[in-house]
Amino acid sequence: MPFDTRCVGLDAEAARAALLRRKNAIIDSQKTLQREMIEVNGLLNELTPINCLPAETLTAILRLVHDSLFTSHPRKLPKDIALRWLGIPAVCRHWRTVVFSNPVFWQDVAVKRASEPLWLSLERVTPTWPMRICFQSASFPWNELSSLNDRRRTLQVLRFDRFPSASVEDLVGLFTGEMPTLGVLSITFEEFVIGQPLPISTSNLPSLWFLSMSQCELPQGLYTFSTLRRLALDRCQWAPDFSRFLDAMEGMSQLEHLTLARALPDPPPAPILVEDGSRQRLVTLPQVRELRISRHHHPASTTTALSYFSFPGATDITLDGYAVCDEQGCLQLGPACLMPPEACTVFPALRSVTSASAVFTEHDYKVRLRSTTGHVTITLSLLSPHQPHHQWSTDNDGWWMVDDLPQICAGASITSLSFSGDFMSAYMELDDRGTGYSLLFQGFPLLQTLRFKGSGACELMWRGLYQASRNALANPLSASGCCPALREIVVGPLEDDPHFNVSDEEAAAMLRALKFRTSHGMRLESLTVDFGGCQEGPREEFKNNYLTRLRALVSRVRLSTLVYSSGAEGEEDSSLDEELGDSGSENDSDAELDDLEDGAEDESEGEDEDEDEDEDEDED
């Protein structure tokens, strides 16, 4: 009621009591209005279209959201998975009621430090219903893990993202009982655990199909699993007997995905033979589609171990390891050391590969092989062991990529090659005639497309192409010549090189190789010189000095100022398309070529004479 101003003359206590009564009346009114507002909002919420659906339909929709969060990450759940899901019941009271009253939403639980979410799930889910639990924090009170003992028979998924080594006994106690429905088990220890292998085997985990373990000694029961379809091991220790490792892998004939990161045991010096001693033992895993062998410090030992296997169905293969260097830090083995001997026996899919992409950076080599349809991908990565920035010791380490690529691709019908990185600085000192590139061309007789990004106009590549073409024609056993199907070459800088230019020496080597091949019926169809992000000056200078001569040797010349991406041509300058298009009729090209005979011949005679003299010296 309104405050009576006539009370001002009364004593202070009476006035204070009157004000408090008025305040309480206002509070009561607010509570009444708040209750009415909640009731009205609830009624309005019930009238929204999604809440007009039957409870079963809304549950099914929310179930789809729930499953997309908890099952879209089969190997490891995101750390904020619990917060993502708890945002759903926080939308409104109706959704909260549906979620909290339905046990189907509590079968999947992500537990961090506090154990309350686990207890809530155990209370809401019927004991006979399956559960999937992920422990994401090492600070969980692991002594409470025994609360799952009564649910062993209904557990379907168990993940331990960060398990402390000091609490291994609590984990061992959990696996002492039978878990007939457990299909997925993932354990990552914070520190390496040795001497306390988990008691897991097919006897207590008969339905296990996915197993991921990290930083531990592998349990003896692992050798008995035959139902596994996914196996991922990281820094795990096998039994010292390599034959037992082969026995275990041979028993896992249903494997579809295999990952061994620093978990491949070293083979013995002497080969392991079959019983009659006629050949080396070979374990075939026909179902493996995805293979990851990574982070091993002894590539030679790794490739030897792989030689005991065959993966006839593997189409997604990744091999990586650390490079082997001498005391001065110089590279001793190139990326070919990652490929096992007789690689086509180990990886039959290698025979279907048609393209190879090689990338050389300051910290690794990477080779990617692909089939025409793209269903086969083989990736090799050789990492530099140097610290702190993992850079190679010297620029000379770069030439390994060119030298090793024919060996890596042995058995494959390569029609497309792509290089990215600086392959020039070291080669200019080690191989001034491009002999390494000559061997590269000889190793890929079916080559059709060649791309070099980051080596400028690649003078040594042109020298190697000339040398290989000349040697092939001089060889009576080579009737078709060197790379007769080669029709396209792309050269250019790295994306961060705004000062790209084609020197006179590079242009001379380019013209010499193209002239020789054209005069012997191996005319190039397309040549792209990508000038990257440089100014117009270098491109115009190259165009004015060499365009006329190139048009006599190449059907189509393209000068681009845009950086092209590896595996695809860059955008062309549309203003140059007409000028740099078809070089004209064949007669015109022949006439221009005749005009070049004298000049180009003079450029090559000196080098040819030097080569002949060197050959004579070698014979002497």
Image (cartoon, grey):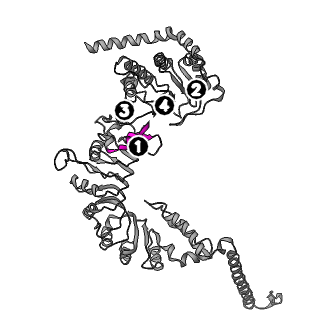
For badge 2, the amino acid type reads Arg
Q: Considering the numbered disc 3 on the image, is that residue within a helix, a strand or a loop?
A: helix
Callout 1: few (<14), some (14-19), or many (20+) C-alpha neighbours within 10 Å?
Answer: some
Q: Earlier in the sequence, mark 4 or mark 1?
A: 1
Q: Considering the numbered disc 4 on the image, is that residue within a helix, a strand or a loop?
A: strand
Q: Earlier in the sequence, mark 3 or mark 1?
A: 1
Q: Are marks 3 and 1 in contact (CB under 8 Å)?
A: no
- What's the magenta region? 346-373
Callout 4: few (<14), some (14-19), or many (20+) C-alpha neighbours within 10 Å?
Answer: many
Mark 2 vs mark 4, CA separation in Å: 14 Å
> Could you tell whether 507 is left or right of 571 in the image?
left
Q: Earlier in the sequence, mark 2 or mark 1?
A: 1
Q: Which residue is mark 1?
A: 379
Callout 3: few (<14), some (14-19), or many (20+) C-alpha neighbours within 10 Å?
Answer: some
**Residue 191 appears in the rendering:** yes
Please say if 576 is above or below 208. Answer: above
Q: Which mark is residue 451?
A: 4
Q: Residue furthest left?
A: 276
Q: Which residue is mark 3?
A: 406
Mark 3 vs mark 4, CA separation in Å: 16 Å
Is residue 366 in the magenta section?
yes
Q: Position of residue 470 (x, y in %)?
A: 40, 18
For badge 4, the amino acid type reads Arg
Mark 3 vs mark 1, CA separation in Å: 15 Å
Q: Which residue is mark 2?
A: 558
Q: Are marks 3 and 4 in contact (CB under 8 Å)?
A: no
Camera-side residue of 112 and 175: 175
Q: Considering the numbered disc 1 on the image, is that residue within a helix, a strand or a loop?
A: strand
Is residue 542 in the magenta section?
no
